[in-house]
Amino acid sequence: MRAIPASLDTAVVAEIEQRLESVAAEHGVRIPWAIESGSRAWGFPSPDSDYDCRFLFVGPRERYLTLWPARDVIETPLDKVFDVNGWDLPKALTLIARGNATPIEWLRSPIVYGGDTTFRDELLAYASAVVERAAIARHYLHVARRQQSGPQTLKRFFYVLRPAAALRWLADHPGDALPPMDLPTLLSETTVSPEIRDAATDLIALKSVTRELGSGEAPAVLRRFAARELERAEASESVAPVPDPGEVKARADELFRRLVG
């Protein structure tokens, strides 16, 4: 599978794909899933946004049958354009089991440099079976609260608005724990008012043509929306775990062995 929008720089995409090939060869791993994360995949890039490629990798069985395990992260040189790094399969599986939404977002990214859909679908099915909605809600709540703790800029507000939209999506989809990744889809699949959607669309349009949004305030309607969703999500802090930890570990082990084997 490959899904590259025309808005991406073809030369940059080619370099990312070359880096992925080099990582696979140098580390002796396969990369069944490589996507774009960050503002481009979240639906609100700026003209100078860098490229945040993230990937999941799987080594041969021998990689995991050792007393001296290798790092579970592979990184490539970071610069103003490229931010390319990835996680080993066990790291992704254990983070999903703990309710970390980041690897789930990678599996749902709208921008895919290269991917095995069977691999993706198996991980999403595993996530759907083991993830607690309250844990995902806490993830997005904490992400937003961390952003609110620093200097407030319009750019940073996007990193509050998207988690707030994810929380609203969870509230509007009580039978699902895996929200979409990008802000426009999150809002389109919720019951938010047209006023909120229009304000978000206008702010995204402003960011798309502005290198630095500065320290101005976000539209009041969006600030109120984010505050309401974060306040409502505070209830997730007291929700007790539901899945049996033993069953969750067994599912993770079974999937890990199958994908490595």
Image (cartoon, rainbow, N blue to C red):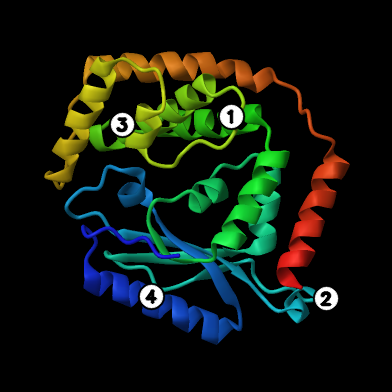
- Reading the chain from its start, which is encountered first: label 3 or label 4? 4
Q: Are marks 3 and 4 in contact (CB under 8 Å)?
A: no
Q: Specify the amino acid type for callout 3.
A: Phe
Circle 4: is it few (<14), some (14-19), or many (20+) Cα within 10 Å? some
Q: Specify the amino acid type for callout 4.
A: Glu
| Residue closer to the observer: 9 or 95 | 9
Q: Which of marks 3 and 4 is in front?
A: 4
Q: Is mark 1 on a helix, strand or loop?
A: helix
Q: Specify the amino acid type for callout 1.
A: Arg
Q: Residue 101: give x, y in percent of width and height.
A: 56, 42
Circle 3: is it few (<14), some (14-19), or many (20+) Cα within 10 Å? some
Circle 2: is it few (<14), some (14-19), or many (20+) Cα within 10 Å? few
Residue matched to label 3: 157
Residue matched to label 4: 17
Residue 67 has which mark? 2
Q: Which of marks 4 and 2 is in front?
A: 4
Residue matched to label 1: 138
Q: What element carries label 4?
A: helix
